[in-house]
Amino acid sequence: MPAQIKRLALLFGLFLAIFLTARYFLVPKSFGEYGHYRGLSLTENQSKIPRYAGQAVCQDCHDDLAGLKSSNEHATLSCETCHGPSLIHAENQDSLPFRPSGRDFCLRCHRIHPARPAANVAMINPEEHNAGQQCTDCHNPHSPWENMK
Amino acid sequence: MGKHEIKNRRRFLKDAALIAGGLFVSGGTGPFGQILFATERKGTKGPWYGMGIDLEKCIGCGNCASACKAENGVSREPYYFRTWVEQYTILNDGTVKISSPNGGIDGFVQDFPESDIFKSFFVPKMCNHCENSPCVQVCPVGATFDSPEGVVLVDEHYCIGCRYCVQACPYGCRYIDPDRKVADKCTLCYHRIMNGMLPACVEVCPKGAKIFGDLNDPGSELVKFKREHSWQVLKPHMNTDSKVYYNGLRAEVR
């Protein structure tokens, strides 16, 4: 074998060794476990902390309100639709969830709007419908048509 | 003549040996199938998650966009959304107007008088969790990938923030997180669905316009939704095999 081939082979071997060593340290341990990505990332993505508890958790304590709500137009709403993320409240009752107030909150869904499917939601024109009054003066949010005042 | 026959026979034997040898060799590739064949159908085992969106039910309250930000710690600035709502307005003269002020979180105003409007409707948008995701294909480091459940995820510790995926997504569903400087997107609330909860946007939707479910489970809500409605996906010509199915999707929606 000519000397220059030997030298080249040696160089090649050296590069290969450097490459494999670098690869060993640079490629994360779980890479390729399930596919072309870091397998551990699945666990990391999965273990983020949720903030919404879910209807079932609310119902465990508030079965009265949930029961009332389920008997009327607001049945399709989850508690957290209006009350916001409440997992912290479920774990520690001292921390209270959001308590909506004011006309603007209700109007997010109930303001008259041409893009809103009228069959799907009751809509009002806030300028004509008892302007200046609070929605909750007449309507119980957990049962909108109950005991209308 | 005789010479010709021998040549033909020799060619026949050669070809036969080649085919037989080829078959023999390919029979031994089983263990390397994942490397050799990139075409294996994904999601045939276990859950395979997707989302249904019923445009006939959406009332454009923006709760989904707002809840998504709260659940996933997305910047409250109006440029970053994992899910958002668009308002489409088709005027009587045929022009299509699209608006999405702050993703619909602050509510919508209709800029056109009712007499000019032919049709107006809301379209919630989100990551389509494509089976053939362009964003996954372009990632140079393998930081974005399909989970075994068909959810397109980002590995925030491996992403180098090169923005290829942001450009590649045909649906505009990705952004660079302003604090962490890595790509971010809807995870279908992976941390919730893998722990038996619904995605935050589905949880808070007041009209049940978003339907989450397992496409491999014939009894799931999503499979039921797909059976009962003539659904359509966004940009089917892109061959992304989107897993977000819209009911009542008009051709004007892009």
Image: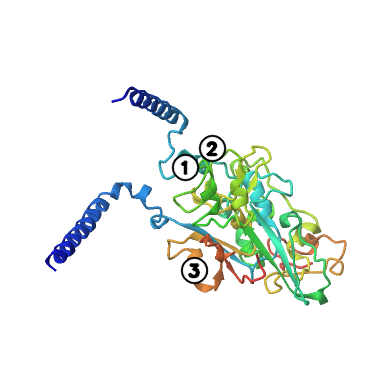
- Tell whether label 2 touches label 1 (CB within 8 Å): yes
Tag 2: amino acid? Tyr
- Tell whether label 3 touches label 2 (CB within 8 Å): no
Name the disc covering residue A37, or none.
1
Q: Is residue A96 left or right of residue B169?
A: right
Spot occupied by residue B64 in the image (x, y as percentages of width and height): 65, 56
Q: Residues within 10 Å of mark 3 (few under 14, many from 20)?
A: some
Figure disc tally:
3
Q: Secondary structure at mark 3?
A: helix
Coloring scheme of the render?
rainbow
Tag 3: amino acid? Lys
Name the disc covering residue B158, or none.
2
Q: Chain of mark 2?
A: B
Spot occupied by residue B167 in the image (x, y as percentages of width and height): 62, 50
Residue B192 visible in rendering: no
Judging depth in this view, the residue of B36 and B81 nearest the camera is B36
**Quadrant of the image occupied by residue A13:** top left
Q: Earlier in the sequence, mark 2 or mark 3?
A: 2
